[in-house]
Image (cartoon, rainbow, N blue to C red):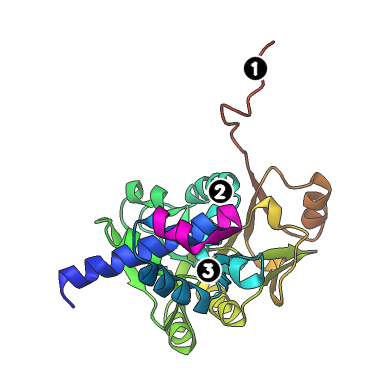
Amino acid sequence: MNMLHLAENGTVATRRRAMVDYVMNRGNVEIDELVTRFETSRMTIHRDLQALSAQGLLRRVHGGVTTLPNGIVESSMLYRRRRAMREKKAIAALAAGMVVPGDVIALDDSTTVCCMVDHLAAMGALTVVTNSLGVAATVGAMPSISLIALGGRYHPTFDAFFGLMCEQAIGALRVGTLFMSVSAIHGVNAYHQEQDIVKAKHALMHSADRRVLMVDSTKFGSNALNRLADLSEFDVVITDDGLDPAVADRLRDHGVTLRMAQLQLSASDEVKPE
């Protein structure tokens, strides 16, 4: 594959990510609007929509396209990157403080964990194990980090690798600390909607000496299909200070070690004197 072909593939992927983001912001969009917005032909737009529809990210309707808040869309990397980013960044900063030079850490495919990556470059020598293609691409460019990328079957919705090959690769390794997230917290249990992803996360948990769960407060009280683990199976659960204090107390009574990331007020949030 030559460099021109790689560049073209990158342009297509970038346009399709932007297209999903555009439709998600508006709910319903006509084909002609997409042609104008992305300055390309109707044929190209139809090809893009066919690919995105096959991934379950967009739904084609007569004369246009829409997106619905179903489980597939909510699982997509594009959707998750936009959700609760202020909370995720605060949680990631707190989690990054648990990493020291020389550590061997595992990072899962979650967008919360992805927010940690920017903190790693300045930490000196680290070994990072991950099944996330996005994380691997970013840390692979950091000269101080030794990257171990887990193979397997690539899942474009999650931009990560899963399946038997991935689980076997994880089973051959031992890491110091695992940083991971989940889709939902219901009661004292963590859940995820995708069975294959639960299997990969289980394998990562079994490979780690220390397990850190990073989950923003908006996920508490929600649910997903597959149970992953009891929260007490994690050495630390990091969330943000938006968590209901009563929920936090119940978790501590259950033996869960909680750490709270403090959310910084943005300029628009600050109370201005009258």
The residue identified by callout 1 is 272
Along the polypeptide, which appears first: circle 1 or circle 2? 2
Residue nearest the observer in this picture, 124 or 149: 149
**In the structure shown, which secondary structural element does the residue marked by tag 1 occupy?**
loop
Residue located 50% across and 45% down the image: 93
Residue 29: x percent and y percent?
Answer: 55, 59
Region rendered in magenta: 24-37
The residue identified by callout 2 is 85
Residue 213 is situated, as x and y percent measured from the top left of the image, at 60, 61
- Residue density around tag 2, few if under 14, some if 14–19, many if 20 or more, within 10 Å: some
Residue ID at (50%, 79%): 54
Q: Earlier in the sequence, mark 1 or mark 3?
A: 3
Task: Name the dominant secondary structure of the magenta segment.
Answer: helix
**Residue that appears at 57% across and 57% down:** 24
* Alpha carbon separation for disc pair 1 and 3: 47 Å
Farthest residue, direction top: 274
Alpha carbons under labels 3 and 2: distance apart: 28 Å
* Residue at which label 3 appears: 209
Residue 27 place in picture, x, y as percent: 61, 57
- On residue 21, the disc is none
Q: Is residue 193 left or right of residue 210?
A: right
